[in-house]
Amino acid sequence: MQAISGEKQEKDFILTEKFGVRSSESKTKYSELRTKNSELNFKKHMDFKLTPEQEMIRDMVRDFTEKNIKPVAALFDEEKQFPYQNLKKMANLGLMGMNIPVEFGGSEVGVVAYSLAIRVWT
């Protein structure tokens, strides 16, 4: 019985030193802190606005698609050809390596920008 109370005292000491809380209070305090932090993080980090770079990429892909893909898509489908010239243009714009790290030759713009590009192409 003495060993258990000794462990409890040690735990209380650690909790009191680090967090200013006794073990009997720790679950309640921890729960309160977690709730406060969750609320703060939600308010702080839930911003779904596109960054200027993401908007620029979306607009660039939209323009490229309107000028280079849509006008010839039906023709390529009918003739069962692959638009290699468009693929080269896309590579020159950095669209072929959007999720590839820069050190390996990609543009590494992130999954949101990549998803926007895919959405515009389809």
Image (cartoon, helix red, strand yellow):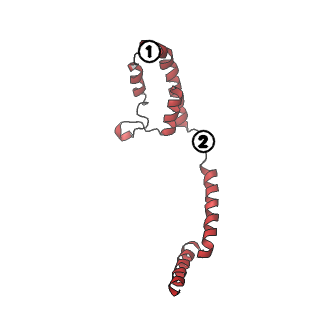
Residue 3 horizontal side relative to residue 23, left or right: left
Q: Secondary structure at mark 2?
A: loop
Structural crowding at the residue carrying mark 2, measured as other residues with C-alpha within 10 Å and reported as few (<14), some (14–19) or many (≥20): few
Asked if residue 91 lies left or right of residue 54, the reply is left
Q: Nearer the viewer, residue 88 or 2?
A: 2
Q: Nearer the viewer, mark 1 or mark 2?
A: 1
Number of labels in the image equals 2
Three-letter amino acid code at disc 1?
Answer: Phe
Q: Position of residue 116 (x, y in %)?
A: 53, 33
Q: Which is more toward the observer, 25 or 37?
A: 25
Spot occupied by residue 3 in the image (x, y as percentages of width and height): 50, 85
User: Can you say whether 119 is above or below 23 in the image?
Assistant: above
* Residue that label 2 marks: 48
User: Within 10 Å of the Cα at label 1, are there few (<14), some (14-19), or many (20+) other Cα atoms?
Assistant: few
Direction front: furthest residue: 1
113 lies above or below 16: above
**Residue 16 image label:** none
In this view, the residue in front, 65 or 54, is: 65
**Circle 2: residue type:** Phe
First along the sequence among labels 1 and 2: 2
The image quadrant of residue 29 is bottom right
Residue under pointer 1: 76
Of 110 and 3, the residue lying toward us: 3
Q: Which percent across, then down, holds residue 111?
A: 49, 39
Using the numbered discs, state the Cα–Cα distance from disc 1 to disc 2 in whole angstroms. 37 Å
Q: Position of residue 75 (x, y in %)?
A: 46, 12
Identify which residue is drawn at 47% across, 15% down: 72
Identify the residue at horizontal 51%, vertical 18% (top origin): 70
In the image, what residue occupies the spot 38% across and 20% down?
Answer: 84
Residue that sits furthest to the bottom in the current view? 2
At x 42% / y 26%, what residue is drawn? 90
